Image: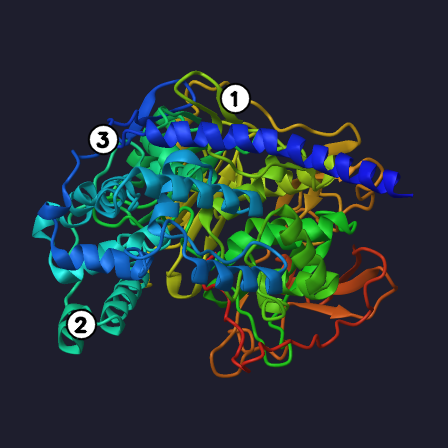
Amino acid sequence: MLRPRRRIWKYILALVLVGMIPSGIWLGLAAWRVWHFAPEAPPDAARLFDTRGRLITTVGLRRQPFISLEELPAYLKTAVIDIEDSRFWTHRGIDLRGIARALWVDIKGRGVIQGASTITQQLAKLHFLTPEQTITRKIQDALYAILLELRFSKEELLEIYLNTIYFGEGAYGIEEAALTYFGKQAHLLTLPEAALLAGLPKAPSVLNPYNNPEKALERRQVVLQRMVTLGHLSEEEAEEAAAAPLELARRRGGPAPYFADYVLSEITNRFGPGLVRSGGLRIYTTLDLDMQAAAQEALGNTQGAVVALDPRSGAIKAMVGGRDYMESQFNRATQALRQPGSAFKPFIYAAAIELGWPMNALLLDHPQNYSGYKPQNFNGEYWGQVTMKQALTRSLNNASVWLLSQIGVQKAIDMATRLGIKNLQLPDDRNLALALGGLTKGVTPLELAAAYAPFANRGVRYEPYAIEEVVDRWGRTLFRHRPAPRKVLSDETAYLMTNMLQAVVENGTGTAAAIGRPVAGKTGTTNDARNAWFIGYTPQLVAVVYVGHDDNKPLTGGGGSLAAPIWGRFARVALQDVPAEGFHVPQNIQTNIPVDTFTGLLANEFCAVRELDAFIIGSAPTQAAPCFFGAAQPQPYRLSQEAGLPSDASEQSSNVQPVAGAAGTTEAAFTAENIGVSDTAESLHTTLPLPAGLPDVIPNIPYILPEEGNPPPAGEDLP
């Protein structure tokens, strides 16, 4: 009976021995790497190339020679040790108390979420390992740390750390960090400057004092307080240092500095700063330097952002995050969350199109009271009722809010989310102000560009990306972008939206963006003209222009007068060598159907305002509009400030009176004044097409107030 048990133990022992073989091999290789480690060897810099192989910038060549510990201020070394590894002088590479605390948090969190890295472990990660957070990696960096402690003295380890750790902004080592952020050598750093730099290695991008000065100063305060707690600084010294203003050196630039920062942040997060610093990486990006130069030139001295994508892949072709990188490194293309204004309206209209609303469906453009929410049109002008296409072309606020009230706010939220709007705040944004871009948080230009791209690309969405491929110094591919297309709209919905947005550029609010080829787009302007937008696209390129002051001061114009001309200047140059191409028309779409703007019916030569609409075959109107010889163009009416009535003070509350009609239609009366016929008081009646299922009488839609009870955003006051 005992023999089988002995045999089992033999098997177990054999398995243990077999398992120890690869572990022993790994440990031997690790020891060999540590013993042959030469930290003073110059790094092989990473280089960024554009889509045509042209050099954009180099990262890593600015590293300075090694600085000995004796050359550095005592408070700098103390600050780094206190904030990063307070038991550095006593542990042997790993901090057992820190590990126990981290493991307890990991167990409670059921994942690797807590760090316990000593300075020695950070050196192991920086020079020998990749940055992923796994249990295996933690074991590996602990073993490497023990080996490093056996190989080097504590002073040597601290010296290596201070000379090789990443401080952000492409700066490796304390000497380069001091030159980058303060324009001085490390031995000249003051206590406030030393404390700020000591806090950066934890999260160089997040704590970057150029991009996030408030967070950098908060981190400086944490470092100073830690030094006080450990008895290395008095309260008075800490208070004096904390009161010192943040005075940074001017930032370094290049042909695409905002884009380079964006790529460097992504690469560092993916591969770790060590490989970026010394791995000889060749980073092939999506940027086109010619388009980049065109974007920078078009923006000129205007504060704002320009970002351009290829809608057929999501590749970022140009990115300008501000008018002057040296003045401000805040990347408005990727970091600025701003109210989009009417630039958000296409998501409302796309949801309606998808629900079956044709572009000739009539929207009510009356003053409405939605439980206290009273949107207004630009200049107080109202058209009574117009086609959906005309409402979008003219950027009519009231018509857009009415449309949202009919299709339901959730449908619009679902559409915007599907297209790529990621910063909606629910439930706060679930209200009718959504139709006018009244968002709690806002959107970034890059986010908005990616959300418009499916309109240009037959309903297919790609995530925007900046890196095509990363190759190491030996030519091995470390990363290659793999596209992941998603069909988010039908071909028909994408084209019908494009058809309407082409009218915005041809004869609507975006005419300044016309460049002599097929272009679709939308303007956007927020309250008091604080933000101005134009998002435009061709089949080959989608680009966003944002204009706005960082201090939120009003602008001198809106999206049509400020942003659209910049877009036109950029696109004209960016596409000068790209053959013009029309938008794809699905086979089941019928185009160029003449429609009367004010009835939605087939237009004849007597209709004063006509539009050329597109329909799914079989859905175009067949009834003729009641236009006749001598009819004048209908004019908008204007509300008086006192009575809230049309400014002609007539007894009517509008020139077009909707009355109850059959389900799916609304009957309206056009007075002689409205259709331009003089000397008659008779009314002409016609049946106006609306999608089936709409209520006969327009309801009083309740407006959902934000939780705080604040009034909703007033929408935009410019188209």
CA distance separating discs 1 and 3: 55 Å
- The front one of 96 and 402 is 96
- Residue at 56% across / 43% down in the picture? 136
Amino acid type at image mark 3: Glu
**Separation of residues labelled 2 and 3 (CA atoms):** 34 Å
Comes first in the chain, label 1 or label 2 = 2
Sequence-first tag of 1 and 3 = 3
State which tag comes first along the sequence, 2 or 3.
3
Horizontal relation, residue 701 to residue 525: left or right: right
At label 1, the amino acid type is: Ala
Which disc number belongs to residue 580? 1
Which quarter of the figure has residue 654?
Answer: bottom right
Helix, strand or loop for disc 3: loop
Q: Nearer the viewer, residue 134 or 282?
A: 134
Disc 1/disc 2 C-alpha distance (Å)? 64 Å
Q: Which corner quadrant of the image does residue 8 belong to? A: top right
Q: Residues within 10 Å of mark 3 (few under 14, many from 20)?
A: few
Q: Residue furthest front?
A: 2
SS for tag 2?
A: helix
- Residue at (67, 57) in percent of width and height: 412
The amino acid pointed to by label 2 is Ala
Left or right placement of residue 375 versus residue 511 in this view = right
User: SS for tag 1?
Assistant: loop
Is 248 positioned to the left or the right of 100 in the image? left
Looking at the image, residue 57 lies above or below residue 594: above
Q: Which residue is mark 3?
A: 40
| Residue where numbered disc 2 is placed | 238
